[in-house]
Amino acid sequence: MEYFGEMLHEVFDPAGPEFYILIGTIIFLVIAWKMGGFAQIGKGLDARGNAVRAELDQARSLREDAQKLLADYQRKQKEAEAEAVQMIETAKAEAERYKAEQIAKIEDFVARRTKLADQKIAQAEASAVAEVKAAAADAAVKAATSILSDQPAASAGNLMSAALNEVRAKLN
């Protein structure tokens, strides 16, 4: 406490320089106050505070906008995913339908080819039967000719017409 007393004594002692520094500082502060220096400092601090407040408000507004955009993009992403799933399901259904159509076409093609082959086989069988009949008829005619050439002419003509009638009856 004694030190504090000495210090006060030096500051308020008109013989020391500390007293004149104190008086000069007080005069400077009074002049600054009268000229509005403190008001200017206050206004400057208020303006700075208002600027900081405005920046904070702007930052809040930007954050809200960013959150809205994020929510919008998340919603759009979910919609796009749902649409992609729908497209995949549609593509699978279309592929199954196309597969069924192709199987039906192939089965129809095979059925038509089988029917055509059956028809060709039937025609070949008919042709073979006709050839066998024709060959049998030729053989019968040759046999009849050789038999008739050995017999007299009158009886040969009767036998020949009877044999030809019999062959015609069997062929038809």
Image (tube, grey):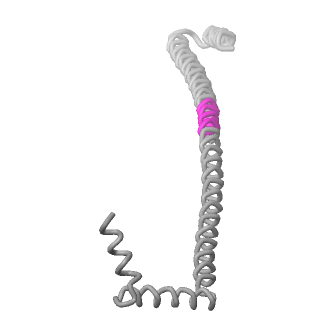
The image quarter containing residue 117 is top right
Q: Tell whether 158 sits left or right of 149.
A: right
Task: Provide the residue span drawn in magenta.
Answer: 88-101
Of 55 and 135, nearer the camera is 55
Q: In the figure, 121 relative to 171: above or below?
A: below
Q: In the figure, 6 relative to 122: above or below?
A: below
Residue 63 at least partly seen:
yes
Split into 4 quadrants, where in the image is the C terminus?
A: top right
Q: In the figure, 13 relative to 147: above or below?
A: below
Task: Decide whether residue 167 is among the magenta residues.
Answer: no
Q: Who's the residue at 60% across and 38% down the image?
A: 85
Residue 162 horizontal/vertical position (percent): 67, 9
Q: In the figure, 28 relative to 143: above or below?
A: below
Residue 166 horizontal/vertical position (percent): 66, 9
Of 123 and 37, nearer the camera is 37
Q: How many marks?
A: 0
Split into 4 quadrants, where in the image is the N terminus?
A: bottom left
Q: Who's the residue at 34% across and 69% down the image?
A: 4
Q: Who's the residue at 60% across and 31% down the image?
A: 96
Q: Who's the residue at 63% across and 72% down the image?
A: 50
Task: Decide whether residue 94 is among the magenta residues.
Answer: yes
Residue 154 at least partly seen:
no
Residue 145 horizontal/vertical position (percent): 54, 16
